[in-house]
Image: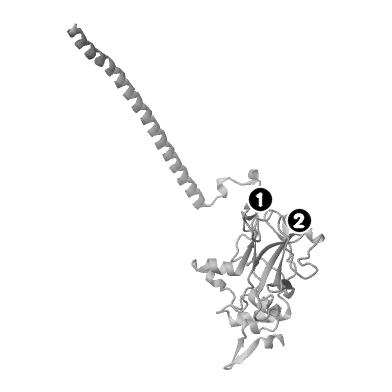
Amino acid sequence: MCIFSVLRREKKRLLLIAPEELPSKELRICFYRNHCLEKGSSMCSCCVVLVLCCLGLLSADQSLKPQLGDFQFATNNPTLTTVALEKPFCMFDSSLYPNRSYAIYLYVMKESASTISSLVTDESSKPLGSTFQQTSGGQLGPYNAAFFDVPDCAVPPRLPDVGDMNKAPDVLTQYLFRVGDDGTCLYDPNFLGVCNPPLVPDTTYRFKYVLVDNSEGIVKDQTLWSDPIKTRRSKLPMKIDTWPGQRSGGMTVITSILSVLVFLLLTGFLASVFSAVMGSEDASAETKGASPTVQQSELRPQLGSE
């Protein structure tokens, strides 16, 4: 029934229905995460994805959790201090009503804080306004790291456009949110917004998206907490491998060229300094040689007058 509910017959052909017509939130997210909501997606491959989604073989329970961005579009993720997450496309569609204003709140906490408190709402279902400072960077509980508009499930980002240098920044901004991307808000006394400061290296975090009704100021829906995600560990200086054999040929060539340029610049500088010193010595010698002659010429008129 699931398979036939997302297919329709049109002009003797079976077609995938529009994203907003998919019968369940989990199925919409499953389709989106496997790139079957994009124009030009292969009908055959999407039918295979459809079967797996319906059979639950693509982890339907994972669809209600924040996920790391696809490694093809978010390389080196996580970094030492940031984590790039997929925005919650199609996650909250069943909770949205026409003519209402909504926002997505992102909460962050350290893995160790889950044993203390993982609640993001108060007794009146209003979202917590806990900050990075108040929770010691997520150590004491969740903090609000950001809020943004609800992504449009009907118009997902065209991820193939990432190959176009002109379109790539906009596509990635539409697809990803980078936690820990603001390195100045903690130290700016005039900053009044929601602070999204850098994360701690080699630390495990969890993340949660929350749907908030702006007019009522209450939480309408929320995802599960993400699986634990750990930031990268920084290498100690003595452990960084500097042996040239581990460098690529291009890096070796560039290093050699830069070394030669530095040598030439240093040589030119020393030569100019040496030339200036020698020039000043020659000038002083000429001045000394000319002084007795000038004195004699001054004395001769004096003797003649006497």
In the figure, 28 relative to 194: above or below? below
Residue positioned most to the left: 304
Front-most of residues 29 and 108 = 108
Callout 2 secondary element: loop
Residue positioned most to the right: 115
| Residue type marked 2 | Gln
Q: How crowded is mark 2: few (under 14 residues within 10 Å), some or many (20 or more)?
A: many
Quarter the N terminus occupies? bottom right
Q: How crowded is mark 1: few (under 14 residues within 10 Å), some or many (20 or more)?
A: few
Which of the 4 quarters of the picture holds residue 107?
bottom right
| Residue type marked 1 | Ser
- Residue that carries the numbered disc 1 in the rendered image: 234
In the figure, 27 relative to 257: above or below? below
Quarter the C terminus occupies? top left
Q: How is the rendered protein coloured?
A: one colour
Q: How far apart are marks 2 and 1 (CA)?
A: 20 Å
Callout 1 secondary element: loop
In the figure, 239 relative to 36: above or below? above
Residue positioned most to the top: 306
Tell me if 294 is positioned left or right of 124 in this view: left
- Residue that carries the numbered disc 2 in the rendered image: 139
The answer to whether any part of residue 222 appears in the image is no
Which of the 4 quarters of the picture holds residue 177?
bottom right
Q: Residue 214's x, y, as percent?
A: 68, 72
Q: Earlier in the sequence, mark 2 or mark 1?
A: 2
Which of the 4 quarters of the picture holds residue 210?
bottom right
Q: Residue 207's x, y, as percent?
A: 71, 64
In the figure, 97 relative to 258: above or below? below
Front-most of residues 156 and 255 = 156
Residue at point 49% right, 67% down?
166
Q: Are marks 2 and 1 in contact (CB under 8 Å)?
A: no
